[in-house]
Image: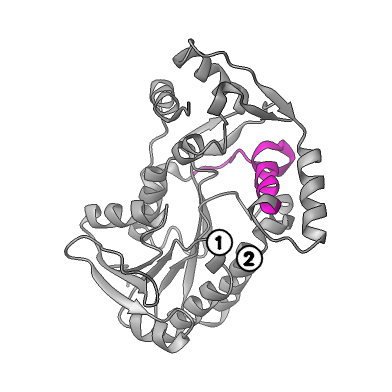
Amino acid sequence: MATVLKNVALVGASGNVGKVVLPALLAANKFTVTVLRRASSSPSTFPDGVRVVDVDFSSVESLTAALAGQDAVVSTVGSAALKDEQKRLIDAAVAAGVKRFLPSEFGCDLTKELPAKLPVFAAKVEITRYLEDKAKTTPLTYTLVYSGPFFDWGLQYNFIFKSAGSKPVLYDGGNTVFSSSTLDAVAQAVVGVLLKPEETKNRAVRFQSVAISQRQLLDIAKEVAPERDWQPEVVKLDDLTKAADERLAKGLFDQETFTPYILRAINDERYEPKFEKLDNELLGIKQLTQEEVKAIVKKTLSD
């Protein structure tokens, strides 16, 4: 009998990814969606028709009760909850008889050797191994969703391309081509996985809205904003990660320490940031046209 994933529990629905995934799940009109909300936090509001369950995320028992009757769990939790909290979610999913678990990945392909060794991704790698073990010993299955860095968000927040002050930073010259996806594409990928449970069972899926480099982004920025005096600066990734290594050795586990490792994974071709095999067709995701890319760059340029 074919697997059907109808009842879907979403965790982290008010975060950057979750707040895009939730409307996509509802728009698909194929799922009954339950949002697991942190009982200790300020109450978040969600659309009518969404069942909301307040949960103690420190308790496997509370999580198990909340996941009763659910077919799939989609985790979009932030960095602070990636490890222990997701482990409890997985344990609860097993106890509740959940069929599919999508961990909070949505970024670099951690099946590749070099990215998987970066300290910033340690929790994600540990969760992947945990899921792999559970899939061998329980009925729970998983799907790892790899999007590359978020394209629209990454531009808006000066992450994949710094447009603020018209002084973009080009890492090692900015010539490395990397896969990148819009948040809408990420949400569509989640829907696609849930609609294709057999084809996406116990594996990674990879997709992109565009494959692009920082140099190409600079060229587009010059085209859509020619009135600005663009003054790019080349920065060596080795310098950034050396400083990060020193901070890590001091026990400084913060954004300043970990961001350079993510930048390395995106902008160093040895880390294979451009996906060679794509699941766009399987997941129903179209890549952006050149004009669409230009429109997003223009819309998201910082002053």
Q: Is residue 70 above or below residue 301?
A: below
Q: Which residue is mark 1?
A: 79
Residue 37 location (% of width, % of height): 35, 72
Residue 49 location (% of width, % of height): 17, 65
Q: How is the image coloured?
A: one colour
Q: Which of the 4 quarters of the picture holds residue 132? A: bottom right
Badge 2 local density, few (<14 within 10 Å), some, or many (20+)? some
Residues marked 1 and 2 touching at CB (< 8 Å): yes
Total tally of numbered discs in the picture: 2
| Residue in view at x 35 percent, y 86 percent | 65
The residue sitting at the top extreme is 227
Q: Is residue 124 left or right of residue 235?
A: left
- State the mark number for residue 58: none
| Residue in view at x 46 percent, y 27 percent | 301
Residue 274 is inside the magenta segment:
yes
Q: Which residues are magenta?
A: 257-278
Q: Is residue 253 above or below residue 146?
A: below
Residue 156 location (% of width, % of height): 46, 36
Name the residue type under label 2. Answer: Ala
Residue 186 is inside the magenta segment:
no
The mark that comes first in sequence, 1 or 2, is 1
Q: Secondary structure at mark 2?
A: helix
Name the residue nearer the viewer: 23 or 205. 23
Q: Which residue is mark 2?
A: 123
Name the residue type under label 1. Answer: Ser
Q: Secondary structure at mark 1?
A: helix
